Amino acid sequence: MSGLLIAVLLALATGIAIFLFARLPIRQMTPVATALLLGLAGYAWQGSPGLAGRPTPPRKAETGQQEEALIAKRKALGERMSTATKWFVLSDSYAVRGETEDAANALVAGLRESPNEPQLWAWLGNRLVAHSGGTLTPAANYAFAQALRLEPDSHSTNYFYG
């Protein structure tokens, strides 16, 4: 009940602040009041302020299954045996367990050894995207761009970047 009381007080404070600072006539406050009341109704219907908050752990099993599918796709696109293979294996072992940061760091170590290996750059881009939860970050974008710079007609890089 105290959560609903706090929400009502916040809605009142917001409505008064909009009225005073926006200098709206009372007739134009109807849409504002409607929005605030709909928000309160939604909170009263869906809100659960009595529940304890706690962080949820990542879903490692689900991450592992996704990574296995991605590894299979990379192999299907024609991963060639090279000096990068050992880094792929190491990175894949981390990724399957859901340790995406370590998986990306393994590829960074491989790039220190062979910085002109386009497959390492492309796979680093994949690992960075996985680490960010599916978002193409500037770092992942840079990794894909490096892979395309080194091998512009690479099927796997274009596939994963796309």
Image (cartoon, rainbow, N blue to C red):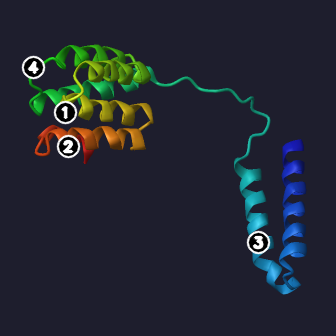
Which comes before the other along the chain, label 3 or label 4? 3
Residue 33 appears at what percent x and percent y? 81, 72
Judging from the image, what secondary structure is the residue with disc 2 in? helix
Instruction: Name the mark on residue 148.
Output: 2
Question: Mark 3 or 2 closer to N-term?
Answer: 3
Quadrant of residue 32 within the rendered picture: bottom right
Q: Nearer the viewer, mark 3 or mark 2?
A: 2
Q: Nearer the viewer, residue 55 or 23?
A: 23
* Residue 28 on image: x %, y %: 80, 83
Q: Earlier in the sequence, mark 4 or mark 1?
A: 4
Cα distance in 3D space between marks 4 and 1: 13 Å
Q: Position of residue 20 (x, y in %)?
A: 90, 74
Identify which residue is drawn at 77% across, 51% down.
Answer: 44
* Residue type, label 1: Pro
Q: Which residue is mark 1?
A: 118
| Label disc, if present, on residue 34 of the rendered structure | 3
CA gap between label 3 and label 4 equals 64 Å
Amino acid of disc 4: Met
Say what secondary structure mark 1 lies in. Answer: helix
Residue 156's x, y, as percent? 16, 38
